[in-house]
Image (cartoon, rainbow, N blue to C red):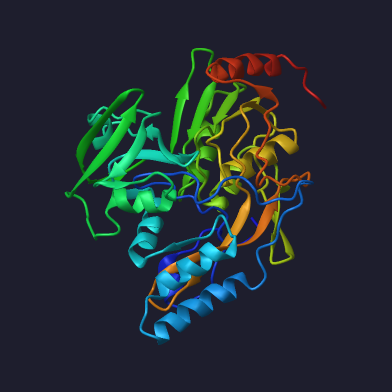
Amino acid sequence: MSGPALFCQPHRIRRGAALTLVFASVLVAGAATGNLPGAGGGTTAEGAPVAAPAGHGTDVARAAEEAAADGASPMEAAQRAVSRSGDRWAAVYSPGEYEEFEEALDGRYTGVGLWARERAGRIEVTRVGDGTPAADAGIRAGDRLRSVDGEKVDGRPVTEVVSLLRGGTTGASAGTTVRLGLERGTRVWSETLRRVRLSRDTVTVSELASRVTVVKVTAFTKGSGDEVRAAVRRAPAGAGIVLDLRGNSGGLVAEAVTAASAFLDGGLVATYDVEGEQRALHAEPGGDTTRPLVTLVDGGTMSAAELLTGALQDRGRAVVVGSRTFGKGSVQMPTPLPDGSVAELTVGHYRTPSGRGVDGHGITPDLEADAEALQRAETVLSGLGRRPAVG
Protein backbone atom coordinates (compact mmCIF):
# COMPACT_ATOMS: atom_id res chain seq x y z
CA MET A 1 0.00 0.00 0.00
CA SER A 2 1.39 3.38 -0.95
CA GLY A 3 1.34 6.42 1.26
CA PRO A 4 2.75 7.22 4.69
CA ALA A 5 1.80 5.86 8.08
CA LEU A 6 -1.12 8.13 8.73
CA PHE A 7 -1.10 8.64 12.45
CA CYS A 8 1.90 9.83 14.35
CA GLN A 9 3.69 7.95 17.08
CA PRO A 10 4.39 10.37 19.95
CA HIS A 11 7.50 8.50 21.10
CA ARG A 12 9.03 8.88 17.66
CA ILE A 13 8.26 12.57 17.61
CA ARG A 14 10.08 13.10 20.89
CA ARG A 15 13.09 11.21 19.54
CA GLY A 16 13.21 13.56 16.59
CA ALA A 17 12.29 11.07 13.88
CA ALA A 18 10.48 12.20 10.77
CA LEU A 19 6.96 13.41 11.38
CA THR A 20 4.07 11.47 9.97
CA LEU A 21 0.75 12.69 8.66
CA VAL A 22 -2.52 12.74 10.50
CA PHE A 23 -5.89 12.59 8.74
CA ALA A 24 -8.11 12.89 11.82
CA SER A 25 -7.99 15.11 14.87
CA VAL A 26 -10.72 13.01 16.44
CA LEU A 27 -9.93 11.14 19.64
CA VAL A 28 -11.03 7.61 18.95
CA ALA A 29 -11.22 6.35 22.49
CA GLY A 30 -10.73 7.37 26.09
CA ALA A 31 -13.69 9.07 27.61
CA ALA A 32 -15.13 10.56 24.46
CA THR A 33 -14.89 10.93 20.74
CA GLY A 34 -16.27 13.59 18.47
CA ASN A 35 -15.55 16.71 16.56
CA LEU A 36 -12.98 19.25 17.61
CA PRO A 37 -13.51 23.02 17.82
CA GLY A 38 -15.70 24.37 15.06
CA ALA A 39 -18.02 22.52 12.75
CA GLY A 40 -18.27 22.15 9.01
CA GLY A 41 -16.32 24.42 6.74
CA GLY A 42 -12.95 23.67 5.27
CA THR A 43 -14.04 24.10 1.66
CA THR A 44 -15.19 26.87 -0.62
CA ALA A 45 -18.80 27.11 -1.79
CA GLU A 46 -17.71 25.32 -4.97
CA GLY A 47 -16.25 22.47 -2.95
CA ALA A 48 -12.56 23.20 -3.55
CA PRO A 49 -10.40 22.47 -0.49
CA VAL A 50 -9.16 25.43 1.50
CA ALA A 51 -5.43 25.36 2.08
CA ALA A 52 -4.04 25.73 5.57
CA PRO A 53 -3.23 29.33 6.49
CA ALA A 54 0.14 30.43 5.11
CA GLY A 55 2.89 30.06 7.67
CA HIS A 56 0.46 28.42 10.06
CA GLY A 57 2.79 25.72 11.41
CA THR A 58 5.76 28.07 11.48
CA ASP A 59 3.80 30.65 13.48
CA VAL A 60 2.72 28.10 16.07
CA ALA A 61 6.20 26.64 16.43
CA ARG A 62 7.77 30.09 16.69
CA ALA A 63 5.30 31.15 19.38
CA ALA A 64 6.11 28.03 21.41
CA GLU A 65 9.86 28.52 21.05
CA GLU A 66 9.67 32.17 22.06
CA ALA A 67 7.59 31.26 25.10
CA ALA A 68 10.13 28.62 26.14
CA ALA A 69 12.97 31.14 25.80
CA ASP A 70 11.07 33.57 28.03
CA GLY A 71 10.33 30.91 30.63
CA ALA A 72 6.63 30.78 29.74
CA SER A 73 4.55 27.78 28.73
CA PRO A 74 5.13 26.70 25.10
CA MET A 75 1.85 24.78 25.15
CA GLU A 76 -0.18 27.83 26.21
CA ALA A 77 1.55 29.98 23.60
CA ALA A 78 0.81 27.38 20.93
CA GLN A 79 -2.84 27.23 21.99
CA ARG A 80 -3.14 31.01 21.60
CA ALA A 81 -1.48 30.87 18.18
CA VAL A 82 -3.81 28.06 17.07
CA SER A 83 -6.90 29.95 18.26
CA ARG A 84 -5.85 32.95 16.15
CA SER A 85 -5.02 30.89 13.07
CA GLY A 86 -8.54 30.04 11.95
CA ASP A 87 -7.58 26.35 11.72
CA ARG A 88 -10.81 24.78 12.98
CA TRP A 89 -9.31 21.29 13.21
CA ALA A 90 -6.07 22.18 14.97
CA ALA A 91 -5.47 21.05 18.53
CA VAL A 92 -2.67 21.20 21.09
CA TYR A 93 -2.06 18.23 23.39
CA SER A 94 0.00 17.93 26.55
CA PRO A 95 2.56 15.09 26.57
CA GLY A 96 0.23 13.01 28.75
CA GLU A 97 -2.78 13.64 26.55
CA TYR A 98 -0.84 12.69 23.45
CA GLU A 99 0.44 9.54 25.12
CA GLU A 100 -3.17 8.62 25.87
CA PHE A 101 -4.01 9.39 22.25
CA GLU A 102 -1.48 6.80 21.15
CA GLU A 103 -2.88 4.27 23.59
CA ALA A 104 -6.36 4.94 22.24
CA LEU A 105 -5.14 4.01 18.77
CA ASP A 106 -3.94 0.73 20.27
CA GLY A 107 -7.46 0.15 21.60
CA ARG A 108 -6.50 0.81 25.25
CA TYR A 109 -7.60 3.72 27.40
CA THR A 110 -8.41 4.98 30.88
CA GLY A 111 -11.87 6.43 31.24
CA VAL A 112 -15.48 5.77 32.14
CA GLY A 113 -16.66 4.25 28.87
CA LEU A 114 -18.68 6.95 27.18
CA TRP A 115 -18.32 8.62 23.81
CA ALA A 116 -19.56 12.11 23.04
CA ARG A 117 -19.62 14.86 20.46
CA GLU A 118 -20.20 18.58 20.32
CA ARG A 119 -23.55 19.66 18.91
CA ALA A 120 -24.69 23.29 18.85
CA GLY A 121 -22.23 24.16 21.59
CA ARG A 122 -23.35 21.32 23.86
CA ILE A 123 -21.72 17.99 24.63
CA GLU A 124 -23.94 15.02 23.83
CA VAL A 125 -23.29 11.38 24.73
CA THR A 126 -23.30 9.32 21.52
CA ARG A 127 -22.48 5.86 22.87
CA VAL A 128 -21.88 4.02 26.13
CA GLY A 129 -19.66 0.95 26.28
CA ASP A 130 -21.17 -2.27 27.66
CA GLY A 131 -20.00 -3.18 31.15
CA THR A 132 -18.31 0.18 31.74
CA PRO A 133 -18.78 2.55 34.71
CA ALA A 134 -20.92 4.82 32.52
CA ALA A 135 -23.20 1.91 31.58
CA ASP A 136 -23.44 0.74 35.20
CA ALA A 137 -24.54 4.28 36.18
CA GLY A 138 -27.39 4.17 33.65
CA ILE A 139 -25.99 6.85 31.32
CA ARG A 140 -27.42 6.50 27.82
CA ALA A 141 -26.75 7.77 24.31
CA GLY A 142 -28.54 11.09 23.85
CA ASP A 143 -27.88 12.30 27.38
CA ARG A 144 -26.37 15.76 27.64
CA LEU A 145 -23.12 16.16 29.56
CA ARG A 146 -23.37 19.45 31.47
CA SER A 147 -20.27 19.42 33.67
CA VAL A 148 -17.22 17.41 34.73
CA ASP A 149 -16.06 17.77 38.35
CA GLY A 150 -18.06 20.98 38.60
CA GLU A 151 -16.63 22.56 35.44
CA LYS A 152 -19.25 23.42 32.83
CA VAL A 153 -18.49 21.93 29.42
CA ASP A 154 -20.88 23.87 27.17
CA GLY A 155 -18.94 25.58 24.41
CA ARG A 156 -15.71 23.72 25.18
CA PRO A 157 -13.87 21.68 22.57
CA VAL A 158 -14.38 17.95 22.85
CA THR A 159 -10.63 17.54 23.34
CA GLU A 160 -10.86 19.51 26.58
CA VAL A 161 -13.88 17.52 27.73
CA VAL A 162 -11.96 14.30 27.00
CA SER A 163 -9.10 15.55 29.13
CA LEU A 164 -11.42 16.41 32.02
CA LEU A 165 -13.17 13.05 31.87
CA ARG A 166 -9.93 11.13 31.79
CA GLY A 167 -8.21 13.31 34.38
CA GLY A 168 -5.56 14.46 31.94
CA THR A 169 -5.45 17.95 33.46
CA THR A 170 -4.81 16.64 36.98
CA GLY A 171 -2.76 13.53 36.29
CA ALA A 172 -5.60 11.31 37.53
CA SER A 173 -5.45 7.63 36.58
CA ALA A 174 -7.46 4.43 36.87
CA GLY A 175 -9.11 4.20 40.29
CA THR A 176 -9.78 7.93 40.67
CA THR A 177 -13.30 9.31 40.56
CA VAL A 178 -14.98 11.90 38.36
CA ARG A 179 -18.32 13.63 38.95
CA LEU A 180 -20.52 14.17 35.90
CA GLY A 181 -23.44 16.59 35.61
CA LEU A 182 -26.03 15.15 33.23
CA GLU A 183 -29.36 16.02 31.64
CA ARG A 184 -32.02 13.86 29.97
CA GLY A 185 -35.17 15.67 28.96
CA THR A 186 -36.41 17.45 32.10
CA ARG A 187 -34.23 15.38 34.42
CA VAL A 188 -30.98 16.92 35.70
CA TRP A 189 -28.72 14.85 37.93
CA SER A 190 -25.12 13.99 38.77
CA GLU A 191 -23.16 10.75 38.87
CA THR A 192 -19.79 9.99 40.44
CA LEU A 193 -17.93 7.36 38.42
CA ARG A 194 -14.62 5.60 38.99
CA ARG A 195 -12.14 5.68 36.13
CA VAL A 196 -10.96 2.25 35.01
CA ARG A 197 -8.52 0.78 32.54
CA LEU A 198 -10.50 -0.33 29.50
CA SER A 199 -9.88 -2.03 26.21
CA ARG A 200 -12.31 -2.20 23.38
CA ASP A 201 -12.97 -4.33 20.36
CA THR A 202 -13.39 -1.90 17.50
CA VAL A 203 -14.44 -4.64 15.07
CA THR A 204 -17.33 -6.96 15.88
CA VAL A 205 -18.88 -9.57 13.57
CA SER A 206 -22.38 -11.04 13.67
CA GLU A 207 -24.60 -13.03 11.32
CA LEU A 208 -28.25 -12.28 10.63
CA ALA A 209 -30.92 -14.93 10.07
CA SER A 210 -30.64 -14.19 6.36
CA ARG A 211 -26.97 -15.32 6.49
CA VAL A 212 -25.86 -11.73 5.94
CA THR A 213 -22.62 -10.99 7.81
CA VAL A 214 -22.54 -7.66 9.66
CA VAL A 215 -19.05 -6.24 10.23
CA LYS A 216 -19.31 -3.32 12.66
CA VAL A 217 -16.26 -1.02 12.90
CA THR A 218 -16.46 1.66 15.59
CA ALA A 219 -12.97 3.11 14.99
CA PHE A 220 -9.87 2.34 12.97
CA THR A 221 -7.36 1.34 15.63
CA LYS A 222 -4.25 -0.74 15.04
CA GLY A 223 -5.09 -4.09 13.49
CA SER A 224 -8.71 -3.26 12.67
CA GLY A 225 -8.12 -3.36 8.91
CA ASP A 226 -6.83 -6.93 9.08
CA GLU A 227 -9.79 -7.87 11.28
CA VAL A 228 -12.16 -6.65 8.58
CA ARG A 229 -10.31 -8.67 5.95
CA ALA A 230 -10.45 -11.78 8.16
CA ALA A 231 -14.20 -11.30 8.71
CA VAL A 232 -14.78 -11.13 4.95
CA ARG A 233 -12.80 -14.32 4.38
CA ARG A 234 -14.80 -16.16 7.07
CA ALA A 235 -18.22 -15.02 5.83
CA PRO A 236 -20.45 -17.71 4.26
CA ALA A 237 -19.69 -18.18 0.58
CA GLY A 238 -21.85 -15.99 -1.62
CA ALA A 239 -23.59 -14.30 1.29
CA GLY A 240 -23.81 -10.52 1.47
CA ILE A 241 -21.94 -8.27 3.88
CA VAL A 242 -23.02 -5.16 5.73
CA LEU A 243 -20.06 -2.93 6.63
CA ASP A 244 -21.48 -0.87 9.49
CA LEU A 245 -19.57 2.39 9.90
CA ARG A 246 -22.28 4.26 11.82
CA GLY A 247 -20.76 6.22 14.68
CA ASN A 248 -17.23 5.46 13.47
CA SER A 249 -15.19 8.49 14.52
CA GLY A 250 -12.18 7.74 12.33
CA GLY A 251 -8.69 6.82 13.44
CA LEU A 252 -5.77 5.39 11.51
CA VAL A 253 -6.26 5.95 7.81
CA ALA A 254 -3.77 3.20 7.01
CA GLU A 255 -6.18 0.79 8.70
CA ALA A 256 -9.10 2.17 6.70
CA VAL A 257 -7.13 1.56 3.49
CA THR A 258 -6.40 -2.00 4.64
CA ALA A 259 -10.13 -2.47 5.23
CA ALA A 260 -10.78 -1.19 1.69
CA SER A 261 -8.41 -3.89 0.45
CA ALA A 262 -10.89 -6.51 1.70
CA PHE A 263 -13.34 -5.42 -1.01
CA LEU A 264 -11.15 -4.04 -3.82
CA ASP A 265 -8.63 -5.64 -6.12
CA GLY A 266 -6.07 -2.88 -5.73
CA GLY A 267 -6.56 0.57 -7.21
CA LEU A 268 -7.15 4.05 -5.87
CA VAL A 269 -8.71 4.61 -2.43
CA ALA A 270 -8.11 8.36 -2.05
CA THR A 271 -5.88 11.24 -3.03
CA TYR A 272 -4.65 13.91 -0.66
CA ASP A 273 -2.53 17.00 -0.72
CA VAL A 274 0.12 18.11 1.74
CA GLU A 275 0.92 21.79 1.32
CA GLY A 276 0.14 21.52 -2.41
CA GLU A 277 1.91 18.22 -3.10
CA GLN A 278 -0.51 15.58 -4.41
CA ARG A 279 -0.28 12.01 -3.13
CA ALA A 280 -2.40 8.89 -3.34
CA LEU A 281 -3.49 5.87 -1.30
CA HIS A 282 -4.02 2.51 -2.98
CA ALA A 283 -5.67 -0.73 -1.89
CA GLU A 284 -3.76 -3.98 -1.94
CA PRO A 285 -4.79 -6.41 -4.70
CA GLY A 286 -6.74 -9.58 -4.02
CA GLY A 287 -9.87 -8.32 -2.27
CA ASP A 288 -13.33 -9.87 -2.70
CA THR A 289 -14.87 -7.86 -5.54
CA THR A 290 -17.98 -10.00 -6.17
CA ARG A 291 -19.69 -10.46 -2.82
CA PRO A 292 -22.74 -8.11 -2.39
CA LEU A 293 -21.84 -5.24 -0.07
CA VAL A 294 -23.78 -2.49 1.70
CA THR A 295 -22.08 0.20 3.80
CA LEU A 296 -24.09 1.80 6.61
CA VAL A 297 -23.29 5.41 7.59
CA ASP A 298 -24.72 8.26 9.62
CA GLY A 299 -23.81 11.70 10.96
CA GLY A 300 -21.28 10.11 13.31
CA THR A 301 -19.32 8.54 10.44
CA MET A 302 -16.17 10.65 10.28
CA SER A 303 -12.75 11.10 8.72
CA ALA A 304 -11.07 7.75 7.93
CA ALA A 305 -14.50 6.08 7.85
CA GLU A 306 -15.65 8.67 5.30
CA LEU A 307 -12.56 8.02 3.20
CA LEU A 308 -13.37 4.29 3.12
CA THR A 309 -17.05 4.95 2.35
CA GLY A 310 -16.18 7.33 -0.49
CA ALA A 311 -13.81 4.81 -2.06
CA LEU A 312 -16.34 1.97 -2.01
CA GLN A 313 -19.09 4.24 -3.34
CA ASP A 314 -17.07 5.90 -6.09
CA ARG A 315 -15.73 2.62 -7.38
CA GLY A 316 -19.18 1.04 -7.49
CA ARG A 317 -18.27 -1.58 -4.93
CA ALA A 318 -20.90 -0.85 -2.29
CA VAL A 319 -24.37 0.61 -1.97
CA VAL A 320 -24.23 3.23 0.79
CA VAL A 321 -27.28 3.32 3.06
CA GLY A 322 -28.05 5.70 5.93
CA SER A 323 -27.71 9.46 6.38
CA ARG A 324 -25.13 12.05 5.35
CA THR A 325 -21.77 11.60 7.05
CA PHE A 326 -20.04 14.17 9.25
CA GLY A 327 -17.72 15.84 6.73
CA LYS A 328 -14.18 15.67 8.17
CA GLY A 329 -11.67 15.38 5.36
CA SER A 330 -8.67 17.47 6.36
CA VAL A 331 -5.09 16.35 6.89
CA GLN A 332 -3.19 17.26 10.03
CA MET A 333 0.52 17.11 10.71
CA PRO A 334 1.86 16.91 14.27
CA THR A 335 4.40 19.51 15.37
CA PRO A 336 6.45 18.76 18.53
CA LEU A 337 6.85 21.69 20.95
CA PRO A 338 9.78 22.44 23.31
CA ASP A 339 7.97 21.19 26.43
CA GLY A 340 7.00 17.83 24.86
CA SER A 341 3.47 18.87 23.97
CA VAL A 342 2.25 18.38 20.40
CA ALA A 343 0.27 20.64 18.07
CA GLU A 344 -1.77 19.05 15.27
CA LEU A 345 -2.10 21.51 12.40
CA THR A 346 -4.04 21.28 9.14
CA VAL A 347 -1.85 21.00 6.05
CA GLY A 348 -4.25 19.72 3.38
CA HIS A 349 -7.36 17.72 2.42
CA TYR A 350 -8.20 14.38 0.91
CA ARG A 351 -10.53 13.49 -1.96
CA THR A 352 -12.37 10.34 -2.99
CA PRO A 353 -11.35 8.46 -6.17
CA SER A 354 -13.77 10.54 -8.28
CA GLY A 355 -12.28 13.76 -6.91
CA ARG A 356 -14.98 14.65 -4.39
CA GLY A 357 -13.95 16.75 -1.41
CA VAL A 358 -15.38 15.45 1.87
CA ASP A 359 -14.47 18.25 4.28
CA GLY A 360 -17.56 20.27 5.14
CA HIS A 361 -19.73 18.19 2.81
CA GLY A 362 -19.68 14.60 3.98
CA ILE A 363 -20.76 11.59 1.93
CA THR A 364 -24.36 11.43 0.69
CA PRO A 365 -25.74 7.88 0.86
CA ASP A 366 -27.25 6.17 -2.17
CA LEU A 367 -30.34 5.35 -0.10
CA GLU A 368 -31.57 7.41 2.84
CA ALA A 369 -32.49 5.44 5.96
CA ASP A 370 -32.58 6.05 9.70
CA ALA A 371 -33.77 3.61 12.35
CA GLU A 372 -34.53 0.96 9.75
CA ALA A 373 -31.10 1.21 8.08
CA LEU A 374 -30.06 -2.39 8.79
CA GLN A 375 -33.36 -3.79 7.51
CA ARG A 376 -32.99 -1.62 4.42
CA ALA A 377 -29.49 -3.00 3.93
CA GLU A 378 -30.80 -6.57 4.03
CA THR A 379 -33.37 -5.72 1.39
CA VAL A 380 -30.72 -4.17 -0.83
CA LEU A 381 -28.44 -7.19 -0.42
CA SER A 382 -31.22 -9.59 -1.37
CA GLY A 383 -31.66 -7.62 -4.59
CA LEU A 384 -27.94 -7.52 -5.30
CA GLY A 385 -27.72 -11.27 -4.76
CA ARG A 386 -30.27 -11.85 -7.54
CA ARG A 387 -28.31 -9.86 -10.09
CA PRO A 388 -26.82 -11.97 -12.90
CA ALA A 389 -23.09 -12.43 -12.91
CA VAL A 390 -21.18 -10.16 -15.24
CA GLY A 391 -18.46 -11.76 -17.34
Rendered-image quadrant of the C terminus:
top right
The residue that appears at 60% across and 39% down in the rendered structure is: 262
Who's the residue at 70% across and 42% down the image? 265
Q: Can residue 18 be seen in this snapshot?
A: no
- Residue 191 pos. (x, y %): 21, 35
In the image, 51 versus 322, the foreground residue is 51
Q: Nearer the viewer, residue 137 or 319?
A: 137
Q: Is 42 located above or below residue 5 in the figure?
A: above
Q: Evaluate whether residue 53 shows in this view.
A: yes
253 left or right of 227? Answer: right
**Percent from the top left, x then y, of residue 152?**
33, 46
Q: Nearer the viewer, residue 63 or 171?
A: 63
Instruction: Residue at the far right: name it.
Output: 391
Between 134 and 106, the residue placed more toward the observer is: 134
Tell me which corner region of the image, top left, top right, bottom left or bottom right, holds residue 337: bottom left
Picture coordinates of residue 32, whole percent (x, y)? 38, 44
